[in-house]
Amino acid sequence: MQAKFDAVLFDCDGVLVDSEPITNGVLRDMLGELGWQLTPAECMRIFVGKAVKDEAALIEAHTGRPLADEWLARFRERRNAALVERVLPIRNAVEAAARIHKLAGGRIAVCSGADRFKVELQLEKCGLMPYFRGRVFSGHEVPRSKPAPDVYLAAAAALQVDAARCLVVEDTVTGVTAGVAAGATTYGYSPPEAGHDAAGALLKAGASRIFTDLAQLPALL
């Protein structure tokens, strides 16, 4: 561990917690209420890895109405309620986080494009917070969200390590792009159910390695 990386920086949604189908289900329902009908696959393709607030122009173009702060607040409320009820950790995420936390001497962090409340809610619900407490970084709290590198650079600075000595773990093209832009080595998590095309897209975005199960990750360090 010490020879390769000084810190490990994890994305949250889709890497540590299985939240994306839940969040996108709520989003799809609410966009439908505004008149933009999407299939589950279309909604995932358009919005996974992105903050809803950053897609306001796209939503407004398809619904013909401004995206009000009140609508975003209702979305977060409905999303949070669904996550509290249903979110689970990604397979082997808790065990991998525990082992990597030990290997890295505690120098691991969560770097998410989501708002802090959501990230911390999910980490608590899924039993992951003991490994990340005090090292949670939100894209809402930096000047630019992913695919900009800001959240990863903020985490590296807080951990007092060079971003070039960090490993970033991501599952989306947006996130891989952010990790690469930060100068970090970036691994793509692409489980078998994501399909061959998903893994290829992560490699094309700059991932230096693809792995399919978080149980594999400690050995890759």
Image: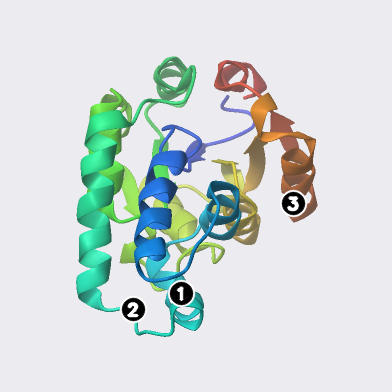
Secondary structure of residue under mark 2: loop
| Residue pointed to by mark 3 | 206
Q: In which quarter of the image is the C terminus?
A: top right
Residue 40 x, y percent position in the rendering: 53, 48
**Disc 3 versus disc 2: distance between alpha carbons?**
33 Å
Q: Quadrant of the N terminus?
A: top right
**In this rendering, the label closer to the viewer, 3 or 2:** 2
Q: Residue 59 carries which label?
A: 1
Badge 3 density bin: few <14, some 14–19, many ≥20, Cα 10 Å: some
| Residue pointed to by mark 2 | 67
Badge 1 density bin: few <14, some 14–19, many ≥20, Cα 10 Å: some
The residue shown at (44%, 32%) is: 16
Give amino acid for label 3. Answer: Gly
Residue 194 x, y percent position in the rendering: 66, 34
Q: Are marks 2 and 1 in contact (CB under 8 Å)?
A: yes
Give amino acid for label 1. Answer: Ile
